[in-house]
Image (cartoon, rainbow, N blue to C red):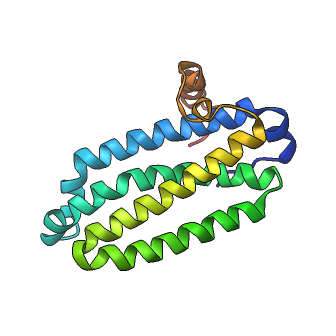
Amino acid sequence: SLVLQQNSVALNPDITGRVLRVSMAFSTCYLAAMVLGGHWLLSLAGEVFPREGYRPMLLLIPGILMFNLLQVLSQVLYALGSPRRIVQLALGALILNLVLNMALIGPFGLEGVAISSTLSYSLLGVGILWMVGRQLHVPLLSLVIPRFSDFSFIPALFLALRSGRIQR
């Protein structure tokens, strides 16, 4: 869980952008691994899952990416003093999810559930991203498109782990 204090976010939107961009990059790598190893991973649960579950899993991936983004964004909005807006947007996404589930489960089954969830998470993510960008007065794309400088901490992290300054 990510906790951001109000002053650190309000005074330095660069921190917020960096956390979002690094989170998006790592989530994208993780989800790419899920695409590549999804059949094998689902086969651990039984024979039926790779055949029946792989396509819904693929349809869920954009929603999972947005959900990961939401974990950071909702904390930022909360730190900026907008918890009510988070609840309002989440309630709208919940209603959308219920309506889409009723419309899509019958004709599409598990794939309908995946589509519904992905659309709901995506719209919620875009709404919260727009609110964060507006409150921090920064362009939306600058919050989510990674930069090389965002990852400058990685060599120092590995050196600290190797030297024992950070315990595993």
- Say whether residue 143 is left or right of residue 5: left
Q: Quadrant of residue 30?
A: top left
Front-lying residue, 110 or 88: 88
The residue depicted at 17 percent of the width and 63 percent of the height is 50
149 relative to 59, above or below: above
Q: Quadrant of the C terminus?
A: top right
Tell me if 99 is positioned left or right of 10 in this view. Answer: left
Vertical order, 63 against 150 (above or below): below
Q: Position of residue 55 (x, y in %)?
A: 22, 59
* Residue 17 visible to the viewer: yes
Q: Position of residue 146 (x, y in %)?
A: 53, 28
Q: Nearer the viewer, residue 117 or 71?
A: 117
Expressed as whole percent of the image width and height from the top left, the position of residue 47 reads 12, 69
Residue 8, percent from left and from top: 82, 39
Residue drawn at x 70%, y 53% is 75
Please say if 134 is above or below 63: above
Residue 108 vs residue 158, the one in the foreground: 108
Residue drawn at x 36%, y 52% as measured from the top left: 61
Q: Is residue 94 above or below residue 72?
A: below
Q: Is residue 166 visible?
A: no
Q: Nearer the viewer, residue 57 or 106?
A: 106
Q: Is residue 59 left or right of residue 131?
A: left
| Location of residue 84 by image quarter | bottom right
Q: Judge from the rendering whether residue 68 lies leftward or rightward of residue 137; answer left or right.
A: left
Dividing the picture into quarters, in which one does residue 112 lie? bottom left
| Total numbered circles | 0
Report the quarter where the N terminus lies. Answer: bottom right
The residue that appears at 77% across and 62% down in the rendered structure is 83
